[in-house]
């Protein structure tokens, strides 16, 4: 056990984390030199977007001073929407490599993940990456790292993951600075599940870290949160290909296959113990995930409803931050109201459903949860604007607020302040200079204002030099109004919105214009209306296709033309009453961007 080192890599998107992992795998001869890049990013979506979505565990062997060390690397995502993945990886480690791109400096989301690691008392090894590039300013960036990590300048390791410079020194420092895991190999088994996935052939595969005792092949295992008992048909270590072993001992990381077919029986954060000699207490669980953004998913083909349910359950096993419950809509049929950690998380889930399970879905406009106080002192939290009660029953409404931390160059501070104030943000504390020219500012802001276009606008006005992170701080009173969309006088609850009173009329007009442009023409005119408290506050009309019925009239009395036009008018009126408007899925995708 003293020769085991468990560590993760913390880095912002595009700071070279996946490339560094490749070099570590090459130097330890876990893979051959020249194999495809970004080996741990094995998902097609990860390669396309250039980001890490899932945590990946891999074991390496490294020789240091004539001793062989086992290095367990748990790769982590860098985007704020996957912070739950990061927290699970950190819980299975004793150390972390903090990778900073020397051309981009310290980013807000990097610091957020760093604080997660420090909270768990992990040893931090700061790494300055991309030193082979000519345009970097290492001294300024190193000062920022010293300020943030509270380390010495000589503790920072300069490397170039792309060129392979300084990689051996990183491995040496991992062995020297990261402590071995603690535990008792003779104690009753305690192993924490930090990830899992569904295999159609073997069932649920759980990835674990052993805290005490050991797991053996054929052993009767008890999952402590559910009380279910299963046999360990196969256990092993996690390399690029899983390698079966007879047992996994204290401090090590591995996988177990128990033939579990029901996805809900394996929970991330659960403790595995021996059924014959069980542990008294489970290991401390991970914090329960709290979704920040909510949206509904409906299958484009209504016959795929049960397939969609099964697919979401399997994704939830692989992504514990996804929550869902059944719901129905008069316009879209049966679907699921889902909770996500952010917009990127929502996009990734949608893409994974389409690519991995072949199910095309319609995504409704995202929203956040609201706390409703009734006059009878009842308090309810709603995640769907369609559940919003009548205003005369309400005492007050509270919406979630977040603390937004922004790192940027002082050159763009004026534009950023204007953006945040326009999003109902209020500045918190004083501006803090990390180094000359680099500044940190904080705002308290409604979560609903940042889940749409805030990130894009921030990047635009700062020319890409600003980064931001946010943390939930609680609910605050707000004056919100529910607006409802009516298409051909029929309410479309899937398009309901809660909007601040100052934005109601502007938003209503935008919605009408967007829908009028995206819904195709029919044989009758279609009114698009937005109502608030039962009153119509905006309207657009989609003109009907109209046949020229008087085209065949060549002269004669004018009453003949009037008769034909009157007959057509009556037909259109009747059609409008009985006609049904088909809303294409592209309309809902257009509606997602209405805030922009």
Image (cartoon, grey):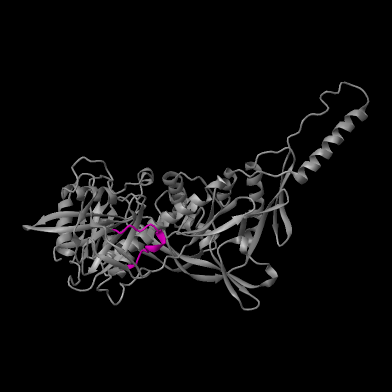
Q: Nearer the viewer, residue 539 or 72?
A: 72
Q: Is residue 38 above or below residue 250?
A: above
Inspect the magenta stretch and tell me whether residue 258 lies in it. Answer: yes
Task: Indicate the quadrant containing the N terminus: top left, top right, bottom left or bottom right.
Answer: bottom left
List x then y, in percent, for residue 109.
37, 59
List x then y, in percent, for residue 471.
43, 65
| Lateral position of residue 480 relative to residue 239, left or right | right
List x then y, in percent, for residue 163.
21, 44
Q: Residue furthest top?
A: 554
Q: Is residue 117 above or below residue 510?
A: below
Q: Can the viewer see residue 499?
A: no
| Lateral position of residue 538 relative to residue 476, left or right | right
List x then y, in percent, for residue 462.
43, 51
| Lateral position of residue 421 relative to residue 20, left or right | right
Q: Is residue 586 above or below residue 229?
A: above
What segment is highlighted magenta in the picture?
257-271
Residue at horizontal 14%, vertical 57%? Answer: 172
Question: Residue 557 appears in which quarter of the rendering?
Answer: top right
Q: Residue furthest left?
A: 66
Inspect the magenta stretch and tell me whether residue 484 lies in it. Answer: no
Question: Residue 499 appears in which quarter of the rendering?
Answer: bottom right
Q: Nearer the viewer, residue 335 or 102?
A: 335
Q: Is residue 575 above or below residue 421?
A: above
The dominant secondary structure in magenta is loop
Q: Nearer the viewer, residue 450 or 77?
A: 77
The number of callouts visible is: 0
Residue at horizontal 72%, vertical 50%? Answer: 539
Q: Can the viewer see residue 531?
A: yes
Q: Nearer the viewer, residue 203 or 547?
A: 203
| Lateral position of residue 282 relative to residue 351, left or right | left
């Amino acid at each position: 056990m003293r020769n085991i080192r468990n560590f993760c890599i913390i880095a912002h998107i595009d700071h070279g984390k996946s490339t560094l992992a490749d070099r570590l795998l090459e130097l330890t001869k876990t893979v051959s030199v020249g194999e495809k890049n970004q080996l741990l990013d094995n998902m097609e979506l990860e390669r396309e977007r250039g980001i890490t979505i899932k945590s990946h565990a891999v074991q390496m062997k490294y020789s240091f001073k004539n001793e062989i060390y086992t290095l367990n690397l748990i790769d982590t995502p860098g985007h704020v929407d996957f912070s739950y993945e990061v927290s699970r990886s950190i819980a299975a480690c004793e150390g972390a490599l903090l990778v900073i791109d020397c051309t981009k400096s310290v980013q807000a989301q990097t610091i957020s993940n760093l604080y997660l690691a420090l909270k768990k008392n992990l040893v931090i090894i700061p790494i300055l990456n991309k030193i082979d590039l000519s345009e970097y300013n290492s001294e300024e960036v190193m000062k920022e790292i010293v300020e943030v990590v509270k380390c010495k300048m000589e503790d920072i390791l300069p490397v170039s993951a792309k060129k392979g410079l300084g990689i051996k020194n990183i491995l040496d420092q991992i062995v020297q600075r990261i402590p071995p895991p603690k535990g008792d190999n003779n104690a009753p088994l305690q192993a924490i599940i930090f990830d899992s996935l569904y295999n159609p052939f073997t069932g649920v595969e759980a990835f674990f870290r052993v805290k005490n005792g050991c797991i053996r092949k054929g052993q009767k295992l008890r999952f402590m949160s559910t009380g279910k008992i299963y046999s360990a048909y196969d256990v092993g270590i996690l390399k690029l290909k899983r390698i079966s072993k007879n047992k996994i001992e204290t401090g090590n990381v591995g996988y177990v296959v128990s033939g579990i077919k029901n996805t809900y029986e394996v929970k991330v954060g659960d403790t595995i113990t021996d059924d014959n000699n069980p542990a008294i207490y489970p290991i401390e669980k991970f914090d329960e995930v709290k979704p920040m953004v909510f949206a509904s998913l409906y299958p484009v083909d209504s016959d795929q409803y049960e397939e969609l349910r099964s697919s979401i359950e399997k994704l939830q096993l692989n992504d514990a931050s996804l929550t869902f419950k059944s719901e129905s809509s008069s316009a879209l049929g049966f679907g699921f109201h889902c909770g996500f950690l952010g917009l990127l998380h929502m996009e990734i889930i949608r893409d994974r459903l389409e690519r991995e399970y072949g199910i095309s879905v319609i995504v409704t406009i995202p929203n956040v949860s609201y706390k409703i106080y009734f006059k009878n002192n009842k308090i309810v939290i709603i995640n769907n604007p369609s559940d919003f009660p009548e205003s005369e029953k309400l005492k007050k409404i509270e919406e979630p607020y977040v603390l937004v931390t922004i790192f940027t160059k002082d050159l763009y501070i004026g534009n950023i302040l204007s953006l945040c104030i326009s999003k109902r943000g209020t500045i918190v504390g004083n501006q803090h200079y990390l180094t000359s020219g680099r500044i940190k500012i904080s705002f308290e802001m409604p979560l609903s204002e940042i889940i749409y276009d805030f990130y894009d606008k921030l990047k635009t006005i700062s020319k890409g030099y600003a980064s931001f992170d946010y943390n939930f701080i609680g609910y605050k009173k707000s004056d919100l109004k529910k607006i409802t969309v009516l298409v051909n006088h029929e309410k479309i609850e899937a398009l309901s919105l809660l909007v601040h009173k100052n934005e109601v009329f502007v938003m209503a007009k935008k919605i009408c214009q967007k829908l009028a442009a995206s819904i195709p023409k029919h044989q009758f005119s279609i009114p698009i209306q937005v109502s608030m408290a039962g009153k119509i506050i905006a309207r657009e009309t989609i003109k009907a296709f109209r046949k020229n019925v008087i085209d065949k009239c060549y002269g004669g009395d004018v009453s003949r033309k009037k008769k034909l036009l009157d007959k057509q008018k009556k037909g259109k009126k009747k059609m409008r009453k009985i006609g049904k408007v088909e809303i294409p899925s592209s309309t809902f995708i257009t509606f997602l961007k209405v805030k922009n």
